Image (cartoon, rainbow, N blue to C red):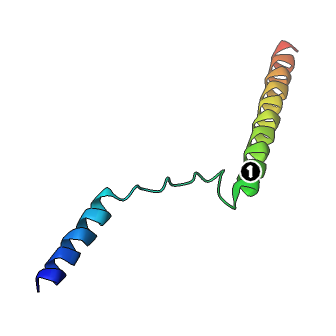
Amino acid sequence: MRLLIVLIIIALLLFKFWPEQPVPTAEESFIGPQIQTIRKAEQIEQQVQEAQDKANQQIDRESDGS
């Protein structure tokens, strides 16, 4: 009985003081390349949106002037 209690105490102490493994970020995991591709696509999409906004503003300025 004493041996069981000692083993339980040792197991609890090991569980409490065992170093935690760092959780990898998404970029460090196996889906990292896909996430990088998505981020690049988001940048391209934002650039296209900005270019379209500029073109629309220019069209508005030209249509207001005539």
- In the picture provided, is 61 more to the left or to the right than 16? right
- In the picture provided, is 44 more to the left or to the right than 23? right
Q: Nearer the viewer, residue 34 or 41?
A: 34
Q: Residues within 10 Å of mark 1 (few under 14, many from 20)?
A: few
Q: Nearer the viewer, residue 49 or 21?
A: 21
Q: Nearer the viewer, residue 32 or 9?
A: 9
Residue 20 occupies quadrant: bottom left
Residue situated furthest top in the rendering:
65
Relative vertical location of residue 8 with respect to residue 57 in this rendering, above or below:
below
Residue 47 occupies quadrant: top right
State the quadrant of the N terminus.
Answer: bottom left
Instruction: Report which residue position mark 1 lands on.
Output: 38
Q: How many marks?
A: 1
Q: Nearer the viewer, residue 51 or 40?
A: 40
Locate residue 14, reporting x and y percent: 30, 64
**Residue at 47% across, 56% down:** 21
Locate residue 65, reporting x and y percent: 85, 13
Relative vertical location of residue 50 with respect to residue 21 in this rendering, above or below:
above
State the quadrant of the C terminus.
Answer: top right
Residue situated furthest left in the rendering:
1
Tell me the element at label 1: helix
**Residue at 58% across, 51% down:** 25
Locate residue 28, reporting x and y percent: 65, 52
Residue situated furthest front in the rendering:
3
**Residue at 31% across, 57% down:** 17
Relative vertical location of residue 2 with respect to residue 37 in this rendering, above or below:
below
**Residue at 14% across, 78% down:** 5
Locate residue 58, reporting x and y percent: 84, 21
- In the picture provided, is 10 more to the left or to the right than 48? left
Q: Residue type at mark 1?
A: Ile
Relative vertical location of residue 12 with respect to residue 37 in this rendering, above or below:
below
